[in-house]
Amino acid sequence: QVQLVESGGRLVQAGGSLRLSCAASGRTFSYYTMGWFRQAPGKERDIVAAISWSGGSTYYADSVKGRFIISRDNAKNTVYLQMNSLKPEDTAVYYCAADPSIVMTTDVREYDYWGQGTQVTVSP
């Protein structure tokens, strides 16, 4: 069982930066694939980025590639999402999720554990 708590979301101007954090409980965190997803009003929940259990492999959606960086600190049971050059279209609720597999996936259906979400709003 893993519990996830996101933090760091807030209102920011376009072009600004934010760092989201996701603190996880559970002794097996270091063996989980971790992902960040986002959901805007009226839209589906989409993957933003994912990171393998070791941090050696990462995935980014095309819309954030070159602007966002996912990382993890297994000693602190925490995964991060550094978001730079933010755009109004990045506005959404951002969710942290955990997949109890060492094989990294981008399929939202494979992630078993979810945080409550944190709101990111980017003003023009």
Image: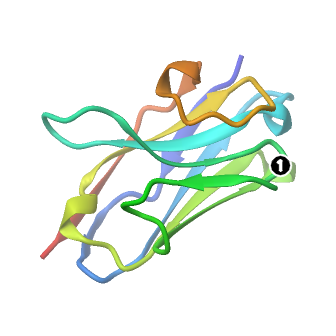
Q: Does residue 36 appear left or right of residue 124 in this picture?
A: right
Residue 13 lies, in percent from the top left, at: 23, 78
Quadrant assignment for the C terminus: bottom left
What residue is drawn where x is 24% and y is 57%? Answer: 91
Find the residue positioned furthest to the front: 62
Q: Does residue 106 appear left or right of residue 25 in this picture?
A: left
Where is mark 1, residue-wise?
A: 74
Residue 21 lies, in percent from the top left, at: 57, 54
Residue 86 lies, in percent from the top left, at: 32, 73
Please, what is the three-letter code of the amino acid marked with disc 1? Asn
Q: Is residue 29 above or below residue 59?
A: above
Residue 76 lies, in percent from the top left, at: 80, 51
What residue is drawn where x is 42% and y is 59%? Answer: 62
What residue is drawn where x is 52% and y is 29%? Answer: 107
Q: Is residue 2 above or below residue 70?
A: above
Q: Is residue 79 above or below residue 95?
A: below
Q: Nearer the viewer, residue 101 or 76?
A: 101
What residue is drawn where x is 73% and y is 23%? Answer: 100
Find the residue positioned furthest to the bottom: 15
Q: Element under label 1?
A: helix
Q: What is the basis of the colouring in this image?
A: rainbow
Report the number of numbered marks: 1
Q: Is residue 8 above or below residue 98?
A: below
Quadrant assignment for the N terminus: top right
